[in-house]
Amino acid sequence: MTDLNVQRQEMSNSSSISHFLLLPLADTRQLQLLHFCLFLGISLAALLGSGLIISAVACGQHLHSPMFFFLLSLALTDLGSICTTVPKAMHNSLWGTSHISYSACAAQVFFFAFFISAEFAFLTIMCYDRYVSICKPLHYGTLLGSRACAHMAAAAWASAFLTALLHTANTFSLPLCQGNALGQFFCEIPHILKLSCSHSSSLRELGVSVFTTSVAFGCFVFMVFSYVQIFRAVLRIPSEQGRHKAFSTCLPHLAVLSLFLSTAMFAHLKPPSISSPSLDLALSLLYSMVPPALNPLIYSLRNQELKDALRKMMT
């Protein structure tokens, strides 16, 4: 009977929360405005870069190939992730506030998990695209036809939706009794879990996390295997020009992949002994804001076809 009363009290505490308090990035007004300008610059860079890539691929007939189709999808995930977290952070920095409503926090968790999961899925598919293009060029049209590309894109968006739905539903079914202050500038699942007082719900979230981590690790192993085969094939190309062309198509994807994985994995897998609010904030900025801003720049600098299309579109 006592356990039942405790559970009812926990659910009452959870249902009474109408908003969360996000981490203020600065204490002084000048630093708040500086953070607003920083967020504005990063978001504008991401919006401009991804928007140019989407426009170039959509308008350029010679860019209607699997590689650029998946690049367009990646640009959409970058736009979605940056638009999910940054506007609220900019609003709080500009107006000196720190609150976010319960429903807005749930929506932020869902869409951020959705776009981050979709980005990882499309990076995996783009790795497969590079593998087939370099290691099995004669079968490229068969393995990556229009129907196959559509099926892979649909699977990526569907798996991202399912992952986001599972995490969001499980996270916001938790009874919260540790207050409503989040140690982050956006609603991030690990910081919401710290407010939970239910061990069974935490174990359920752990099960969901283990499942998604296992799938992500499988994709990571596939990427490593693919790039080992890709580099072995490239090094066997006799002409220097052929090797340069192969590397020029692989290096942008490898740079984007390394940036995204290194920051995201370290942010979520670092030991608690080195955790601190300032380090958590810096890592979250690195994996949530920097990749969407740099991805278009990395791809446009290393891809000659994309640079030509952008130049033609601009002139």
Image (cartoon, rainbow, N blue to C red):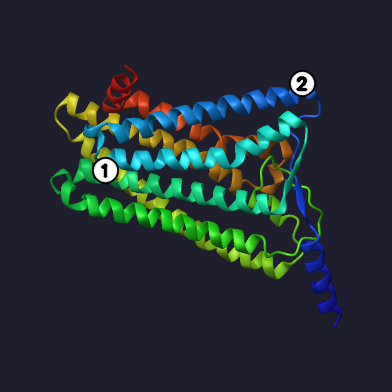
Give the residue furthest to the top.
315
Give the residue at mark 1.
66
Which of the numbered marks, if any, corresponds to residue 30? 2
Residue 153: x and y in percent read 35, 51
Identify the residue at image location x=72%, y=67%: 199
User: N-terminal of the two: label 2 or label 1?
Assistant: 2
Which of the numbered marks, if any, corresponds to residue 227? none
Q: Are marks 2 and 1 in contact (CB under 8 Å)?
A: no
Identify the residue at image location x=64%, y=54%: 106
Q: Nearer the viewer, residue 212 or 103?
A: 103
Badge 2 element: helix
Q: Is residue 201 visible?
A: yes
Q: Nearer the viewer, residue 41 or 269?
A: 41
Residue 226: x and y in percent read 31, 47
The image quarter containing residue 5 is bottom right
In the image, is 163 to the left or to the right of 139? right
In the image, is 161 to the left or to the right of 234? right
Badge 1 element: helix
